[in-house]
Image (cartoon, rainbow, N blue to C red):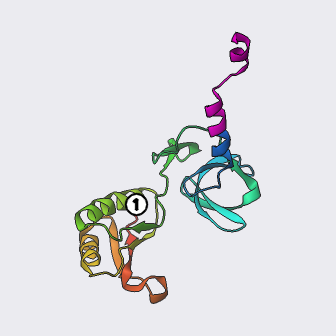
Amino acid sequence: MDTLKEKIEEPIEKQYLQEVKERRPLRIGDRVRVRRLDTDGIVSSIAEDDVEVQIGKMHVKVDVREIERSNNKNPVKDEPVEITGRGDSGKEIFYPSPGIELHLRGMRAEDALLKLDRYLDSAHAAGLPFVRIVHGKGTGTLRQVVREALETAQLVDRWEIAMDNEGGEGVTIAFLSEN
């Protein structure tokens, strides 16, 4: 009996769960390795033949056959990344992009404003020129609160209603200031 225990490195349940995790379909938010670029990123969208992967503030469309699940167990953090060898100081800081779109539909105004404020900070730090804020049409209360907040937001130069084919009254596009 002791020799049998010695042969099993991990409990069978752990081995099975790891195999199941590796076989499950790829999902948005999964960490993957892009072989061609030899770097890790986060899956941001999945199409039939390709996958969009966010690497820092860059989004890259990659053929499904060019990615694999990442072996790096550390989560990707929304923290600045220092790149050496740039600029006068020798370092340049890049902030990861929070994505170009923020979804607030169905949220209470108070919660939506808090989320909007954090999102605008992240988007501005990442250098995004504009963002899409999806608040939905509904009763118009959330739309009104969001637009009033954008009027006074220091990081926003101006905002406009999205075109009809981009969401119309249910989406507001905010143009972020450069400094």
Residue 148 rendering spot, x and y as whole percentages: 23, 74
Residue 155 rendering spot, x and y as whole percentages: 33, 64
Could you say which is closer to the camera, residue 70 or residue 175?
70
Tell me if mark 1 has few (under 14), some (14-19) or many (20+) residues whose alpha carbon lies within 10 angstroms of its own.
Answer: many
The answer to which image quadrant residue 65 occupies is bottom right
Could you say which is closer to the camera, residue 27 or residue 123?
27
The answer to which image quadrant residue 62 occupies is bottom right
Question: Looking at numbered disc 1 in the image, what kind of residue is underneath it?
Answer: His
Figure label count: 1
Span shown in magenta: 1-17
* Residue at image location 62% in from the left, 33% down from the top: 13
Residue lying at the far top in this picture: please name it.
2
Q: Is residue 17 above or below residue 125?
A: above
Q: Is residue 1 above or below residue 34?
A: above
The answer to which image quadrant residue 29 occupies is bottom right
Q: Is residue 94 above or below residue 127?
A: above
Residue 139 lies within the magenta run: no
What secondary structure prevails in the magenta region? helix
Q: Quadrant of the C terminus?
A: bottom left
Residue 151 rendering spot, x and y as whole percentages: 26, 74
Q: Which residue is mark 1?
A: 124
Q: Secondary structure at mark 1?
A: helix
* Residue at image location 70% in from the left, 15% down from the top: 6
* Residue at image location 56% in from the left, 58% down from the top: 28
